[in-house]
Amino acid sequence: MPTVFADVDTGVDDAFALAYLLASPDVDLVGIASTAGNTGVQQVCRNNLALLELCGATGIPVSVGSALPLSIPLRTAEDTHGPTGLGYAELPAPTTQPSGFDAAEAWISAAHAHPGELIGLATGPMTNLALALRADPELPRLLRRLVIMGGSFEYRGNTTPVSEWNIAVDPEAAAEVFAAFGAQSGALPLVCGLNVTESIMATPQILARLADAAGSPTTEMSPQDVRGTRSTATNPLIRVLEDAMRFYFEFHFDQGEGYLAHLHDPFAAAVALDPSLVRTRSATVDVELHGTLTRGMTVADFGAHWNRPPNAAIVVGGTPQQSAPLADVFFERYIARVAPFARRLAS
Ligand code: RIB
Ligand code: CA
């Protein structure tokens, strides 16, 4: 039974990732850390609590992390994820409270409660993970696996020409996290950067397939729809996912990328549960902190130029055994898990 701790900045795709974890059979999601990023930390926490309530999973402790990055002001992404971080989705205010632990403490207590077993998943800025590592340098050796959605390797950025959002929000935290891993740390973190996650493109057709598999009538989304048109799905989880996703589709459309959305975080969640999905290359990764043009860039030394041990396993694509593109393999798995879960919620 995979034991998972998810550190998220919920966010549209973070919500899709949480749905995947909750829908995955035999996954024991032992905690969720709320990290400031796509929106402020209290809103991220509200989104996490509300989503868990919608999914009938209110027993999972949700912690609240730092309101700010380690050393710079917070920047948020309401233009991308909407004013509440969940696009157009309107979730009832949660009736539950956060755990009372802060997120760094929650990381540490989860790792000590499940020594050698805990799978960590970070799909937001790494502020709280860095604080946890400062407080407990043993953390890398306690984790069975760490999967990070962040960075961009031999590929462009999405927040600056060279920096990916989760790194750009808190580059100092990312640098501290990568520095905490290496020769003595046990398993190297699996890093899902934009170089792969931007190939995981959700489309209205894929969302319609999800609704259909969940037995929920819906109206397939289209760029011709009036902005903010609400989902007609009858299934409560499908409706939330569609309303969240529509905002994300509109954002990518306005960026000239098409009426689609990159599902960065649920892809990282799928890798966290099954690393055999992907091919990786080990490298020494560091984060540029002082470059005037390149601050927040993840730099990967694949060639031992720095004479430092590898500290990351960078995801570079699917595996030769896969008979379909990685994105197709992922969406098949996503629908196969989340659709029956959504159906059960409505029954
Ligand atoms: O760059 C993509 C990442 O930034 C995703 O985790 C998304 O949720 C945003 O946080
Ligand atoms: Ca995220």
Image: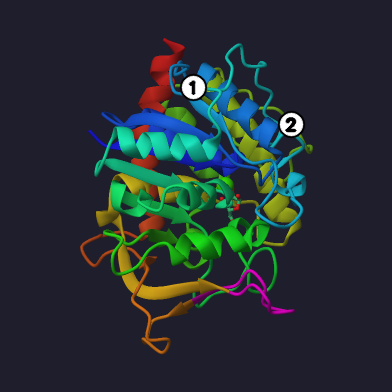
Q: Which percent across, then down, holds residue 86?
A: 66, 35
Prevailing secondary structure of the magenta residues: loop
Lower sequence index among marks 1 and 2: 1
Viewer-proximal residue, 177 or 270?
A: 177
Magenta span has 97? no
Question: Would you identify the image quadrant in which residue 5 lies?
Answer: top left
User: Residue 73, relative to residue 218: is it above or below?
Assistant: below
User: Circle 1 sits in a helix, a strand or a loop, which is it?
Assistant: loop
Q: Which percent across, then down, holds residue 80?
A: 71, 48
- Disc 2: residue Cβ within 8 A of ligand 1's nearest atom: no
User: Circle 2 sits in a helix, a strand or a loop, which is it?
Assistant: loop
Q: Visible in this render: residue 221?
A: no
Dot 1 amino acid type: Ser
Question: Would you identify the image quadrant in which residue 229 lies?
Answer: top right
Q: Which percent across, then down, holds residue 11?
A: 62, 40
Q: Please tell me which residue is depicted at 67% across the width and 56% down the height of the picture.
A: 169
Q: Residues within 10 Å of mark 1 (few under 14, many from 20)?
A: many
Is 338 on the left-hand or right-hand side of 247? left
Is 85 on the left-hand or right-hand side of 21? right
User: Residue 5, relative to residue 320: is it above or below?
Assistant: above
Circle 1 is placed at which residue position?
Answer: 216
- State which quarter of the image contains the N terminus: top left
- Disc 1: residue Cβ within 8 A of ligand 1's nearest atom: no
Is 344 on the left-hand or right-hand side of 131? left
Dot 2 amino acid type: Thr
- Specify start and end residues of the magenta stretch as a single range: 288-299
Q: What whole-number distance in Å separates the C-alpha atoms at marks 1 and 2? A: 17 Å
Q: Please tell me which residue is depicted at 39% across the width and 45% down the height of the picture.
A: 120
Q: Visible in this render: residue 318?
A: yes
Q: Please tell me which residue is depicted at 72% across the width and 79% down the height of the picture.
A: 293
Circle 2 is placed at which residue position?
Answer: 229
Q: Are marks 1 and 2 in contact (CB under 8 Å)?
A: no
